[in-house]
Amino acid sequence: MEALLNALPWIVGGLMLILLLAALRRPLQWLAALAARTGAGLAVLWLFSGVGHLMGVHLGVNLVNALVLGVLGAPGFGLLLMLNWALA
């Protein structure tokens, strides 16, 4: 009986954690998808930095630009290029 009383807080905590993860499943999936798309955007920026200097265009490889690419995709890339042109 004492072992059950000692394990009871762990059982209740585990059940609460399961309920919390079940409630946050959609936001966590959205956040994971955003992180994956941002990583892909960062890779595109890194690849473009090697080729962009040949065209005279330089986009910074940073988290803000990668987030723009992750959220907006190809139109975000065009937006970054137009901002680079407009601010140069």
Image (tube, rainbow, N blue to C red):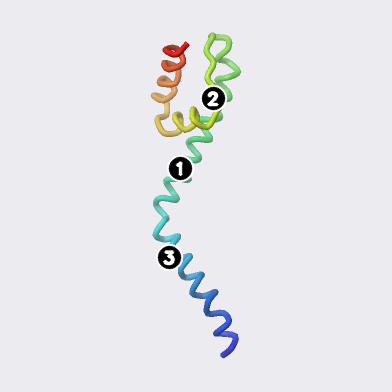
Return the disc, 2 or 1, that comes first in the chain's sequence: 1
Label 3, residues with CA under 10 Å away: few <14, some 14-19, many ≥20? few
Spatial CA span between label 3 and label 1: 22 Å
User: What residue is shown at x 59% (from left), y 88% (from top)?
Assistant: 2
Q: Position of residue 32 (x, y in %)?
A: 48, 45
Question: Camera-side residue: 86 or 24?
Answer: 86
> The N terminus appears in which quarter of the rendering?
bottom right
Mark with earlier residue (3, 1): 3
Neighbourhood count class around disc 2 (C-alpha, 10 Å): few under 14, some 14–19, many 20 upward: many
Amino acid residing under circle 2: Leu
Task: Tell me the residue that label 2 is attached to.
Answer: 45
Instruction: Report the Cα–Cα distance between label 2 and label 3.
Output: 39 Å
Callout 3 amino acid: Leu
* Secondary structure category for the residue under label 1: helix
For marks 2 and 3, the one nearer the N-term is 3
85 and 55: which is toward the camera: 85
Residue at 58% across, 82% down:
6
Label 1 Cα crowd, 10 Å radius (few <14 / some 14-19 / many 20+): few
Q: Which mark is residue 19?
A: 3
Image spot of residue 45 (x, y percent)? 54, 25
Task: Give the total of numbered labels.
Answer: 3
Label 2 to label 1, Cα distance in Å?
18 Å
* Amino acid on which the number 1 mark rests in the picture: Ala
Q: Nearer the viewer, mark 3 or mark 1?
A: 3
The residue identified by callout 1 is: 33
Image quadrant where residue 87 sits: top left
Q: State the SS at label 2.
A: helix
**x and y, in percent, of residue 12 in the image:** 49, 74
Circles 2 and 1 in contact, beta carbons < 8 Å: no
Q: Element at badge 3?
A: helix
